[in-house]
Image (spheres, rainbow, N blue to C red):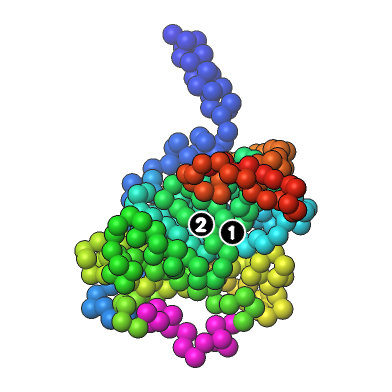
Amino acid sequence: MRKMLVAAVSRVLSDVAQKPASRVLVASCNFSNDATFEIKKCDLYRLEEGPPVTTVLTREDGLKYYKMMQTVRRMELKADQLYKQKFIRGFCHLCDGQEACCVGIEAGINPTDHVITSYRAHGLCYTRGLSARSILAELTGRRGGCAKGKGGSMHMYSKNFYGGNGIVGAQGPLGGQIHEAFNMAALWKLPCVFICENNRYGMGTAVERAAASTDYYKRGSVIPGLRVDGMDVLCVREATKFATDYCRSGKGPILMELQTYRYHGHSMSDPGVSYRSREEIHDVRSKSDPIMLLKNKMVNNKLASIEELKEIDVEVRKEIEDAAQFATTDPEPPLEEIGHHIYSDSPPFEVRGANQWIKFKSIS
C-alpha cells in the first residue's frame, strides 16, 4: 500500500514538474471574478450629468483588454521596425501610447455600430475586427492585406468600419454620407458620437501654442461635450457607454475629447523629439502608460497575476512575429489588378494607364 502511495505521489510530482512553472502558479491562484474601481471624473459641457466615477471590471474583460492593448502596442512597434527596414513605404502614423482609446471605445459600443476615423487608425482597425496579420500585410502592400495591398496605412476597412482617411477632417462629411446611406437622419440630427483624440500635439505644435482655447470638448458650440482621461481604458469605456446611450436616447450628437499621448512622432518621418523632450515622453510612460495602469489595477486587485500577464505578452509577441513574417513574404498584388475594386458594384470598364495605349480592366 505504501509503495502504491509513493508511486502515485511520484507521478503527480512528475506531471507538475513537466508543466511550465508559471502555469502551475496561475492555476493555484485564487483570482477574484471582478473588482470595483474609481475612475477620473469627466469635465462636462452643456450636460447636467456625466459618466459614473466608479466602474466594475471583470477578470474576463480585464484579460481581454490587456491582450488587445498589448497587441496594438506590439503591432505598432513592429510597424516601426518594418518601416525602417523599408518594407513599409509612404505615410505611416502610429498610435502606440493611445491604446486605451481604441480598446475603450470598442468596449463601449456595439459590434453593429458604424465607425469612421482619420489616420492613426491601426488600433481601431484591430479592435474593429481586423487581424494583426491583415493590418501589417496592408502596410507592406501585400495581397493578404485587409484592402488587398492597395490602401496602406490610412485606408483600411472592415465590416462597419470605414477607414482610415488621409485628409484631416475628411471623416466628418464621409460619416454624414454613411448615415444618409442608411436613411438615418439629417446630418445635424445624427445620433453620433464625435470623438477627438487629443494627444497634446498637432503634428509638431503643442496644443497650447496652436489654439486660443484647448477645451476641445466645448468646440461643438451647441453640441454637448465631455473631456475624458484617454489613458485609462475603463474611463474611456464608461464615457463611450454614456455618450452612445445619450445618442441612442434621441438627444442628438455629443462630442467626446480623449486626452491621450502618442509615443512616436506625428508620423514615421517625424522623430518626435524636436518639439518635446525625451524626459516628457519618459514621464508619461512611467506614470500614465495605459497598459501599465490596467496591469497594476488587475494585479493589485487579484484579477490576474504578473506571471499570467507575462504569458499573454509572450503569446502576443509570437502572434506579431508570425504576422510580420506573412507581411514580408506574401506576394504583392499584380499590376493588372490595379483597376479592381474602384466601385463596389458596377459593370467592368477600362481604366486608362500612364498613357492612352495602356488600359486596365476595372472589376467590382
The residue at 55%/83% (across/down) is 207
Q: Residue flagged by tag 2: what amino acid is it?
A: Gly
Residue 353 lies left or right of residue 131; in this view the side is right
First to last magenta residue range:
206-220
**Where is mark 1, residue-wise?**
154
Image-quadrant location for residue 134:
top right
Spot occupied by residue 278 in the image (x, y as percentages of width and height) = 68, 74
| Residue 85 rendering spot, x and y as whole percentages | 78, 53
The residue positioned 68% from the left and 51% from the top of the image is 352
User: What secondary structure is marked by label 2?
Assistant: loop
| Dot 1 crowding, Cα within 10 Å, few <14, some 14–19, many 20+ | many
Magenta span includes 215:
yes
Q: State the SS at label 1.
A: loop
Q: Pick whichever of labels 1 and 2 is earlier in the sequence.
A: 1
**Residue 71 magenta-highlighted:** no
The residue labelled by disc 2 is 163
Can the viewer see residue 67 in this picture?
A: no
View extreme (right): residue: 85
Given contact means CB atoms under 8 Å apart, are the residues at marks 1 and 2 in contact? yes
**Residue nearest the viewer, comparing 200 with 93:** 93
Q: Is residue 50 above or below residue 240?
A: below
Location of residue 337 by image quarter: top right
Disc 1 marks which amino acid? Met
